[in-house]
Image (cartoon, rainbow, N blue to C red):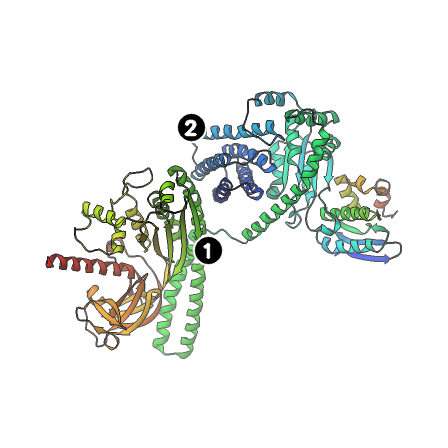
Amino acid sequence: MANVNDNNQHSGRLAIDGELTIYTALELKDQLLAALAATEELELDLSAVGEFDAAGLQLLVMIKQEAITLGKAVRFTGHSPVVVDLLDLSGLAGFFGDPLLIVRKPTREGKPT
Amino acid sequence: MIPDEYLQTFVVECRELLEQMEEALLIVEQAAEDPEIINAIFRAAHTIKGSAGMFGLEPIVAFTHAAESVLDQVRSGDIEMCSALASLFIEAHDHLNILVDHVAENSQPDGDIDHHGKSLIERLEAYLKGAETAEKVTDNSDEMPVVHEATLEREQSDVVGTDHWHLSLRFGPEVFRNGMDPFSFVRCLATLGSIVELVTLIDAIPPAQDMDPETCYLGFEISFSSDADKVAIDSIFNFVRSDCLIRILPPHSKVSEYQRLIQDLPEEEMRLGEILVKCGTLTPKELDNVLRFQAEQSDSPQRPIGEMLVEQHIVSPPVIKAALEKQQQVKDHKKTEANLIRVDAEKLDELINLVGELIIAGAGTNLIARRAGLANLMESTATLSRLVEEVRDSALALRMVQIGGTFNRFQRVVRDVSKELGKEVDLVISGAETELDKTVVEKIGDPLTHLVRNSMDHGIENAELRLARGKPAKGTLKLNAYHDAGSIVIEVSDDGGGLNKAKILSKAIERGLVSEGANLSDKEIYSLIFEAGFSTADTVSNLSGRGVGMDVVRRNIQALRGTVDVDSIEGQGSIIRIRLPLTLAIIDGFMVGIGNAAYVIPLDMVVECIELRAWASDEGDGQYLNLRGEVLPYRRLRDHFDVEGDLVQRENVVVVRYGEHKAGLVVDKLMGEFQTVIKPLGKLFKSEKSIGGFTILGSGEVALIVDVPGLMGQIEIEKGTVERAGIVAAK
């Protein structure tokens, strides 16, 4: 199960823990949207994502696009190896525009941005 | 070699798909195009092609491929579905059916079939070429002008430079829910070669509020370098083929193929073009070529590409949405299908046989318990027999199928026959959900076909005559089914001219079937049409009128322990009623005793039991009873079956009903309800109409099952001869 830690309301930071997959997509969608609604700039910490699949990828795309529509910002940080792997495969890193390529190596060593 | 059972499954599936396809084609032929139905046809063709490919059945693959390509263009709107095209597809469907038959029989199609197939492929391909030239001109897509020759040459000359495969994948919305991850296919693909470039398409992901996180919106464009052949690459996607859009272009494909690809995919052209360039599949120059090539083919070569793209852009979102909705619906349909299990009919028969034995054994135990007088044992056997009864019911229900499938097949028959005869006829189906035994369903098809053809040929008049009689020009043929008193009734009715009594009678006299001056009721006259060698048609047509047929129909139906009769109103139409038993295996019986023998009467047909003396007064001639003022013909079973033994004091009458007839059967003893497994009688007793079979009682004794319709028929015939003899004597 994914465990979402809504640590800090002000900075709009959300950490996704565990699965970011089809099994958790339904509830995560609502949580992501709620988190985005509460802040102007949302930071999604993906460092604890243990499983990541195409449904998870869709969610990230969705929240990114939603943020653009609302004129807000979403940043993904601390991509865990599974996330990096799939983003790499999908060729979508450019779409998200996060400093993934720079971040990628440190993440693999377990260091967040 | 392919294992037989897989091949059988393939054949069964193909037949089902072909059936669906036929159904859809008939609708398309009639009405304007409905994208959903065209999609269904396409999917059927596609699935057949896919599974035939798995078995390496090249002729089917090649043939279906041609059909599929045209359908694909129809689907994308490049070719307009017209009734001519639908007819062509119906021919193609028939051809596929023949090919599948050959697979089933493990035989090779002969030269004629091959030739036919080739000519069909040619005709299909003609449409394809027609579409290419007519593309985007749309308005008058007159089939294949002379221009194509040029197109063909151009196709050959322009080849794209890349030596990579190009794969376009659009995953269906249900992919996640079906437990699959699109990326797993990509990973699988990577085992066959190397992925040069992959672009994930996220364009279809809707805005947050509309997005269903469990629906897949993804697509991939992949440039792929591999030495594998197309079949190997293609087979990776076997699991998702049905709900995904998959296009695989081999290296050095023709420009036109890319162009077709761009058109096939849901995204707008410019975006796709960019993606293709990004994938390295096309160079920017090549893309330009592709798009220009397309522009050249359209009517106005000067039209800027941009304008076309804008147009495309406007067109595409609703198309995507429609496609998704369609897929959803099909998927829902599939889900219900997935709840079905295919079971070998023989296994079912075996089960029912066993249940039959169980019933006999149960009855035996019951008898012993009663004799022993042990209350506990009796109670438990009672529970047991109730359970056995339930098992029997559900076992029989397994064999029950809806008659709708059989009825729907007649859409095609009616279409073909109405074309052949030049009459316009509508088929109206009702009661399609009525269930009956599978064996009965299988055997009723032929007689029904005959009746339907007959009604259309003889019953329904031609348009002029209909108009003159104040009827709509289009005739109506109705198929109806319903349950009635333990049997199923199937009605074939038409609003045609009805039966001409005088004509039938004169013909019958001419043929020597009836003696002149015989006094026949309407019913009797109508049923003459079922006599062998009888036809009142003035002209013998291709279909009917040769006097063979109706008697065969009656024989077939009687072989199923059914009856058939006709009702007609002259000038308004006629109705043919077939009455069949629901099942052939087990019945609820009512056991009666005559002398020392036991007989079983099907319980469904028993109306009531009365004591002969107490209720009804014998009218003297031994033929009719007065049952509360109703005239009831009756028959002593003791006399009928020639049973010896002591007469009993109080005889009972079992009143039975079959259809509209009622009759009384006089028996010695009433022995109560009894579950009966019908065992067929040997051939020796074939001519005995009044006995339908036998059963083994719990005690091991044999009881004969009275075939009520047969018995009634026999009584009627005997009565008829007696009456006729009387008339002759009176003269």
Amino acid type at mark 2: Gly
Residue B437 horizontal/vertical position (percent):
40, 55
Residue A79 horizontal/vertical position (percent):
82, 46
Query: Nearest the camera: B495 or B77?
Result: B495
Chain assignment, label 1: B
Judge left or right: residue B622 versus residue B137.
left
Indicate the quadrant where residue B533 lies: top left
* Mark toward the start of the polypeptide (2 vs 1): 2
For the C terminus of chain B, give its image quadrant: bottom left
Judge left or right: residue B456 versus residue A81.
left
Residue at (38, 44) in percent of width and height: B467
Query: Nearest the camera: B390 or B486?
Result: B486
Above or below residue B598? Residue B680 is: above
Rendered image: mark on residue B111: 2
Above or below residue B485? Residue B232 is: above
Residue B306 horizontal/vertical position (percent):
73, 31
Residue at (31, 64) in percent of width and height: B657
Mark 1: few, some, or many residues within 10 Å (few <14, many ≥20)? Answer: few
Query: Nearest the camera: B438 or B452?
Result: B452
Q: Are circles 2 and 1 on residues that touch, CB within 8 Å?
A: no
Judge left or right: residue B399 versus residue B166.
left
- Do the residues at pointers 2 and 1 share their chain? yes
Residue under circle 1?
B433
Amino acid type at mark 1: Glu
Residue at (77, 51) in percent of width and height: A50
Total numbered labels: 2
SS at mark 1 in the image: loop
Residue B590 in sight from this viewpoint: yes
SS at mark 2 in the image: helix
Residue B10 in sight from this viewpoint: no
Rendered image: mark on residue B666: none
